[in-house]
Image: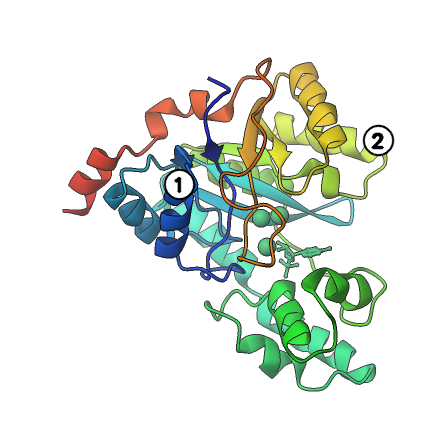
Amino acid sequence: MAILNADLHCHSNVSDGTLSPEQLAARASANGVELWALTDHDEVGGQRRAMAAASALGLPYLTGTEISITFAGETVHIVGLGFDADDPQLKQGLAATRGGREARAREMAAGLAVVGVKDAFEGALRYVGNPELISRTHFARHLVETGVCNDTYEVFRRFLVEGKPGYVPHRWAKLGDAVRWISEAGGIAVVAHPGRYKFTPTEEYALFTEFVAHGGRGVEVVTGSHSAAEYLKYADLAQELGLLASRGSDFHAPGESRTDLGALPWLPGTLAPVWEALADRVIAPLDAATASS
Ligand code: AMP
Ligand code: MN
Ligand code: MN
Ligand code: MN
């Protein structure tokens, strides 16, 4: 059924969200989400808590993560869904991907200091819930809180994107590795918010061709990061390439994220929803209750 309030993309304070996995589960449930996945960046440390909280609320759950990769010189995000969260290869791959974030953050702070924004590393750190996961989002919150910018979007625009003083190029995981970690852990790999990347049509085609060749199977069509025109564009692409379609708000924080949990348009009815292919990986409230006892 394409008409299911599935929200398979959001972040807790285990990565760059502000709410705990438990608070997110409660918010998803209150907003009418019928199938939920927590997809923290490069991390599965919140999965047990999300699963337990979802179970207690009677909310069906899929495991999730969002892996940062580098493709054609750009950062691309690959969402993994329905994998075994204890898989050693996946956990090791994510740990390696997290490594280097602190050094990068110190370089970002050095770049910001040059333009007069002092002590940004210490400032950003105050917003970090997981010391291995300091991200640009934490810098953005610090710069808003200290009055340098009015909102996080302005911080990114002025300071944190390529060509700006706080931007530090970084080499993330490889596409093939990320897809393999997810698939071999029993999950499905999905290209996150493809409309956000600054690729030429040729580069975008290469991304999807290589993604599929590595065993990737899904694409986010309806996401908080897409415009209505992009829903249509990527619905067409999903059909052309025979990809499963996903739906997720990419919710990070109340008052900061434009799209709340569960508040997206439906997936177009012509598409094959990724959650149908993952039906046997859905953790029904009863399963999780048994698993955690
Ligand atoms: P990082 O993994 O440290 O590079 O941080 C990436 C995160 O920053 C993304 O997951 C978003 O939460 C946020 N982000 C990236 N680009 C923007 C933008 N242009 N405006 C607002 N938030 C952004
Ligand atoms: Mn994020
Ligand atoms: Mn993303
Ligand atoms: Mn995300």
Residue beneath the point at 83% across and 67% down: 164
Evaluate whether residue 102 shows in this view: yes
Mark closer to the chain start, 2 or 1 = 1
Q: CA distance from mark 2 to mark 1?
A: 32 Å
Residue denoted by label 2: 201
Label 1 sits on what residue type?
Answer: Thr
The residue lying furthest to the top in this view is 270
Query: Would you say the beta carbon of the disc 1 residue lies within 8 angstroms of ligand 4?
Result: no
Dot 2 crowding, Cα within 10 Å, few <14, some 14–19, many 20+ = few
Task: Name the spot of residue 107 as percent of width and height, x first.
Answer: 71, 75
Look at the numbered disc 2 and give the secondary structure of its residue.
helix
Left or right placement of residue 258 versus residue 46 in this view? right
Q: What percent of the width, then of the height, locates residue 216?
A: 57, 29
Q: Nearer the viewer, residue 15 or 253?
A: 253
Q: Is residue 45 visible?
A: no
> As displayed, is residue 185 above or below residue 15?
above
Q: Is residue 287 left or right of residue 254?
A: left
| Residue 3, above or below 140 | above
Residue at horizontal 60%, vertical 13%? 270
Give the residue pinned by disc 1: 63
Q: Is residue 137 left or right of residue 27?
A: right
Disc 2, disc 1: CB below 8 Å?
Answer: no
How packed is label 1: few (under 14 Cα within 10 Å), some, or many (20 or more)?
many
Residue 27 or 155: which is nearer the viewer? Answer: 27
Residue 289 at x, y percent in the picture: 19, 41
Image location (x, y in percent) of residue 222: 61, 32
Relative height, residue 154 to residue 272 (above, below): below
